[in-house]
Structures are given as C-alpha cells and as structure tokens.
Image (spheres, rainbow, N blue to C red):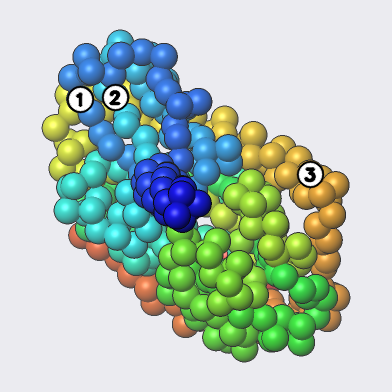
Amino acid sequence: MVFRKTVILATICLIGLGLAAGPAIAQPPSLDQWKPTFDPSTAKYKCIVSNVSHPVIKGVYAGFAIRDELWKRTNGQIYLDYKPFSMLGGEVEVVNQLQMGAIQGMSVSSVTSTNLGPRFGVVNLPFLVDSFEKLDKFVNSGKLFDHFLMAMDHQGIMALDISGYGNYGWATNKPVKTIEDAKKIKFRIAEAAVNQLLYKVWGFNPVVMPWPDVPVALKQGVIDGLDHTPMVCNITKKFEVAKYFTRLNYAQGLFIWVFNKAWFSKLPEDLQKTFKEVVKDVCAKIREETKLQETEEIEKAKKDGIQFFTLSDADMATLKKQGDAVHKEYATEINKLYPGDSYKPENYLKEVQDYLGYQP
C-alpha cells in the first residue's frame, strides 16, 4: 500500500513538473545576447520591426546594428524594437500587419515581398541577380535600384535598402546530383508567386510552406528538402536533417528593409534623413560581411559532414532555359507602373536584364 502511494505521488509530481516545464519550452528564443546597452524607455519615437530568421545570419543581425546606430545618431530619439526569430509570426501575416500599421517595419525576404510588391520579384527571377557581384552592380545602378525600392510604395510601404543571406540552392535529405534526382524531392518553397512559377516550369514537386513550419515538416518527412541558402540551412540547423546541398546559385537571398510610410512621415524631417542614412550605411556594411559569412558557413558545414554537389553543365543549361519562361510570364507584373513612380521605363525587366548581362 505504501509502495502504491509512493508511485502515485511520484507520478503526480512528474506530471506537475511536465506542466510547469511546458510553457518554458514553448517560450520564444531569448534575445538576451542582443539586448541594447541603453535604456530604450526614454526614446521619443519607437518602431517595431520584424524578421523571421536567426540574427546570427548577418543579413538578419542588421536589424540590431540599425537599432544601435539609430540610437547613436539620433541621440536616443528613435528606438528600433527588433523582433527576429518569427516572434511576430510568418512573413505573409507580418506583411499584412505592416500595411495596417500594427507594426512599423520589417526586413521581408525578397521571395515573400512580391505578395504586396510584384516588382520586387525581379531579384527572384532565375539566373538574373545570381551572384554577389551582380547584386553589387544592381544596388549601385541608380535609377534601376531606386525603381526597385518603390515596389510597395503604392501599398503605403517604403523600402530603404537590402541585406542578404547568400545564394539559393537545395538542401535535401538524400543526394541530388541531377535534375532527375530533384524530381523525386518534395521541396519546401516560400509563399511567393515567382518561386511557385519557377518550380512549375522546372517540373518539380514544391510544397508551399511558411518558414516557421519548416523544422517540424523536415523532421517528419512532410518535405524532403528545401529551396534555400547554405548559410541559412547551417545556422538554423536544417543540415541536422537535410545533410546534402546542391549548389545552384540561381538567385540571391535578400531581406528588403521596408517601413510603414504613414509612421515614417510623422518623424521630423531631420530624423527621417538620419533614419534613411543609417539603414543604407548599415546595409552596405552587412552586405560585405555576408559574402564572407557564406564561405565560412559552407566550410563549417563541410567539416560537419554535409556533402555539397553541383549539377552538370547540361542540367544547369536546362534549368536556365526552362527558367526563362518565368521571366516572360512574370514580366507584366514586374513592369507595372504605379502613380508614385518617378521613373517610368517602358520595359523595366529588359533594362535590368541588359544591365546585368542576362542570357537565357
């Protein structure tokens, strides 16, 4: 009888511990290591800015760098309250929050940004902005890049600059060395029009899924791989399940730093100017750091046993040829003009293609 009572008591204690631990396990990732060194409560102006990924990624960490530099240059007048790790939800829902003014900014991935700004899709087109060198050239193109940044302006959202997260390829749980191998994989792709078109013309098997859902889906076999960059896959531990990476380098992964125009217009003119300068200065520095980080993360992954592959020249030529159909199909959306546009090109996509030397 005593033994029975002891077992029951122990069971109750274990259940109690489980219930107590549950909420703790469910807590969002800690931002303690990125805490500001100043007291933000004294700021005159505050903006909440979201990102879905991990701030160890340089292009994501940019938010904390912007926060600190803004505080410094505005003498503590603006506090940027940065929320990475999908703390505010998946990108599609956060874009809607931004448009409604529930939050003031986000660094939205280029793949998802097309939901409110189709022109942003120009950087997702296959084999167009497909290297760090071409990205630098595009950023320094003047009117072409400025026109790109106007993509969400008609939605009440302004874009100031970009940071990145490397070159896109395939992380998979079995080797993909050919197009035929790829056709056997259930690839997670972003909730983005260009990506869906691309995987359709490539004849692959995409699964459209918000980024926060990926870890569980990958572990449970709902997907066999994902369309992403090696840097992100290594830092966010996707390589713990998907131990192979096929390097396509068909597009650059970008975060576009966008803000609610109505909120921004309420800032004094001098602070507006400083805000823009800070975002541009930080993003320029972070883009350089991203180039080094991709190389470092690939080397780390290789040391951990991740195998990297490239497709044959013939297979790459096939992907490029098929991918050109997406350029043609999405051109109308990219070329669409809006009332706020000061630059009104007849064929914006063609201008970007010619400028970057695109050849299908």
User: Is 211 left or right of 166, judged from the image as shown?
Assistant: left
**Is residue 11 shown above or below 78?**
below
| x then y, percent, for residue 294 | 70, 45
Mark 2 highlights which residue? 79
Q: Which mark is residue 300?
A: 3
Q: What element carries label 1?
A: strand
Evaluate whether residue 173 shows in this view.
Answer: yes
Q: Residue 45 carries which label?
A: 1
**Spatial distance from mark 3 to mark 2, Cα to Cα?**
35 Å
| x then y, percent, for residue 280 | 45, 33
Q: Earlier in the sequence, mark 1 or mark 2?
A: 1
Where's the C terminus, which quadrant?
bottom right
Of circles 3 and 2, which is in front? 3
**Spatial distance from mark 1 to mark 2, Cα to Cα?**
6 Å
Q: Nearer the viewer, residue 181 or 154?
A: 181
Q: Are marks 1 and 3 in contact (CB under 8 Å)?
A: no
Q: Nearer the viewer, residue 29 or 117?
A: 29
Residue ID at (52%, 38%): 55
Residue ID at (76%, 62%): 243
The crowd level at tag 2 (other Cα within 10 Å; few <14, some 14-19, many 20+) is many
Evaluate whether residue 130 shows in this view.
Answer: no
